[in-house]
Image (cartoon, rainbow, N blue to C red):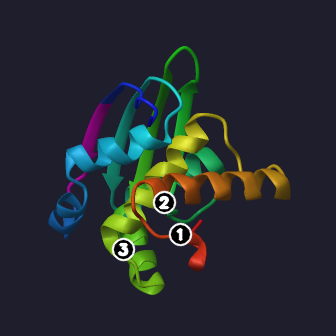
């Protein structure tokens, strides 16, 4: 019997930028909620914000001291009893990576949302090779359960 998916309170936000319509189309709210709920081990309140390159770069510079826009940033505030986090995805970076990797925009967003949700729950691929392998295996399993291909056929994170 499949496990019951945890409850999720979701705020899905789109910044104003050129081409935002394609990103809205790739991210219907029900689909974003489905992807995230499959990655969660317990209840969560998540904000997902889709931003342009300027906002993505500014956030990465301010919080990680890296002066470039990255695909996904996770700001986790609490892990128990409810996961509270913001996931910020940089639309132009996601679009470039999806095109370079031969993926649809929706497939790449699904992977990055799962990746960000795992970070919000304490998973970390930068602490050790073993942690990176465990997180990657978890992502692959979650995406397979969603009927999506292995995202690591080509590196994305």
Numbered label tally: 3
Tell me the number on the disc at residue 51. none
Mark seen at residue 150: 1
Badge 3 vs badge 2, beta-carbon distance below 8 Å: no
- Which element is circle 2 on? helix
Residue 89: x and y in percent read: 41, 55
Judge whether residue 81 can be spotted in this image: yes
- Picture coordinates of residue 87, whole percent (x, y): 44, 44
Looking at the image, residue 153 lies above or below residue 5: below
Q: Quadrant of the C terminus?
A: bottom right
Report the residue at 56% width, 55% height from top. Answer: 141
Q: Identify the mark nearer the N-term, 1 or 2.
A: 2
Q: What stretch of residues is rendered in magenta?
A: 10-16
Mark earlier in primary sequence (3, 2): 3
Q: Which residue is mark 3?
A: 95
Q: Is residue 90 left or right of residue 75?
A: left
């Amino acid at each position: 019997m499949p496990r019951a998916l945890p409850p999720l309170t979701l705020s899905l936000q789109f910044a104003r930028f050129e081409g935002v319509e394609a990103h809205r189309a790739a991210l219907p709210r029900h689909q974003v909620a489905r992807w995230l709920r499959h990655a969660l081990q317990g209840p969560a309140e998540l904000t997902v914000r889709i931003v342009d390159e300027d906002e993505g770069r500014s956030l990465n510079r301010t919080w990680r001291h890296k002066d470039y826009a990255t695909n996904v940033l996770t700001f986790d505030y609490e892990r128990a009893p409810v996961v509270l986090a913001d996931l910020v995805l940089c639309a132009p970076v996601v679009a470039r990576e999806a095109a370079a990797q031969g993926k649809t925009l929706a497939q790449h967003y699904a992977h990055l949302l799962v990746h960000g949700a795992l970070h919000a729950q304490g998973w970390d691929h930068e602490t050790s090779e073993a942690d990176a392998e465990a997180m990657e295996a978890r992502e692959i399993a979650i995406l397979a359960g969603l009927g999506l291909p292995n995202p690591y056929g080509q590196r994305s994170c």
